[in-house]
Image: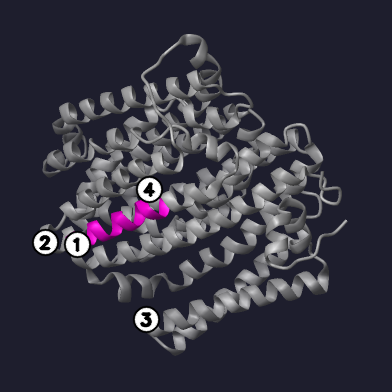
Amino acid sequence: MDEKNGLPERPARLAGNALIWQAVQMGGVKAISLLRILVLARLLTPLDFGLVAIGTTAMGFLLNVTNFGMIPALVQGEETDEDQYNAAWTIGITRSLLIAAAMIAAAPLIATIFAEPRAVTIIRIVALNPVVEAISSIKLARLNRNLLFKPLSLLRLADVSVDAVVSIAVAMLFGIWGLVAGMLAGTATAAVGSYFLAPHRPRLFFEREAVRPLIRFGRWIFITSLIVMVGSYVLRIVISRQLGAAGLGLYFLAAQLAFLPAEVAGQMVGNVAFPLYSRLQNDIAQATRVFRAILTSLAALLFPICALIIVLAPSLTRDLLGPNWEGTQPIIQVLALVTMIGIFGEAVAPVLKGYGQPYRITLIELIQSTMIISLVWILTERFGLVGAALSWLPAVSLSQFLSAHFIRQILHQPFSGLRRPIMAVLVITGVSAAIAGAAHFLIPGLVGVALGAALAALAAGGLLWISDRRFSLGFMRNLVWAFPQIAAFVGVPSVD
């Protein structure tokens, strides 16, 4: 037992290593993905992105409406046997084959729904991706449960690297097909690599008793996925029908850029925090400390990044994306603000899942998606693509209040002592954004963007360190409590 930090030494050390590897993964993945997007934006058109977005939207919808939550259930469960792993793998294979068949058969109907008949062939090729993904080793779930994130990170980096290389190479010769070829190549790389990193000899197996405990937890994951995808699906249908496939392409790319910080929060922290909270179900005090540490860390990291995106969005669209992407600036800015508001919810979701209460996430997503669906048609008709982005603001804002209500029922005084550090982060975010804006104003173009981003990062990091030392805001203390291995890695001494 780690007496000073109140957490068993082994889980603490594993959590620290896991978060380090998640940071490596996310940094690499997002850098590669951003480079891929910027290069492909020069090679392809908004119409190309829009057509592929129709295919991936249809695929994502069917994946989510058939997502029985097998993987999260395997991660959350304390005792899982081989029969349950094989049953989960069998369900995954069966599900992917049904999805592929449905997409291939319904491709003309899906294209009609989006008012874009040119998407039929794209939809049918994209349908192969779930089948390739489902072949992967189911024992990856055990690595996740045990917080062994190094192999998972290496696998994900290989996936996106192959995707980027193949996408760009094929796009230079065959245009839009680069996006499809890269997706399939990346997924195939991950599927093959999974058996080297998580060896398993799968077999087709299905028994009701083996599946029942997984279904009990996973049914709420299924319902949540269904709600999220209905909201996303309706949003994209409205954009495509009112503004065409090119308009959908503009929104799709803008959302990818603006939601990058949210993906960092969900994947880097959420993937580690979920199994960690599962291990802390009987230790409310330590779980509360971890929650405070994660929330303040997310705010300190992502608030300045989101503010930077908002300030530099005009130059990003003009100088990096090019004239084909004119009009994405306000969409990126609104969605970056949505990301800032939603950071709190990203910290709450792993607690609800880890404590076996995914039904509360379902309720949050139901309210949020219902509001988006209610607002998107009206706002898009009146304000165009900006209206589609604006529909997120009230929905995400309301969901944060509901998240706060739920977290108070699980943890003991979860917000105690957070007012001062969060206020400090907001002030530092404003200062760093002003520095970035001033640098870009004085030196227009890409050089100004790079200089502004670098100065803003240095200012944010320096001010966070100074304010923590000067006003005892607890950033370092919370880091030590939650992840002592990371504290040792960066040279921070332990505290009582």
Whether residue 39 appears in magenta in the rendering, the answer is: no
Residue at the (34%, 58%) spot, across then down: 161
> Which residue is tagged 2?
173
Q: Are marks 4 and 1 in contact (CB under 8 Å)?
A: no
Local SS, label 4? helix
Q: Earlier in the sequence, mark 4 or mark 3?
A: 4
Q: Is residue 7 left or right of residue 317?
A: right
Q: Amino acid at mark 4?
A: Leu
**Boundaries of the magenta span:** 156-169
Question: Separation of disc 4 and disc 3 at Cα?
Answer: 33 Å
Question: Separation of disc 1 and disc 2 at Cα?
Answer: 7 Å
> Which residue is tagged 4?
379
Q: Amino acid at mark 3?
A: Leu
Question: Separation of disc 2 and disc 4 at Cα?
Answer: 39 Å
The crowding category of the residue bearing disc 1, from other C-alpha atoms within 10 Å (few below 14, some 14 to 19, many at least 20), is some
Rendering coords of residue 55 (x, y %): 24, 41
Q: Earlier in the sequence, mark 3 or mark 2?
A: 2
Rendering coords of residue 476 (x, y %): 75, 63
Q: In the image, is residue 228 above or below residue 443?
A: above
Local SS, label 3? helix
Q: Amino acid at mark 2?
A: Leu
> Which residue is tagged 3?
446
Q: Are marks 1 and 2 in contact (CB under 8 Å)?
A: yes
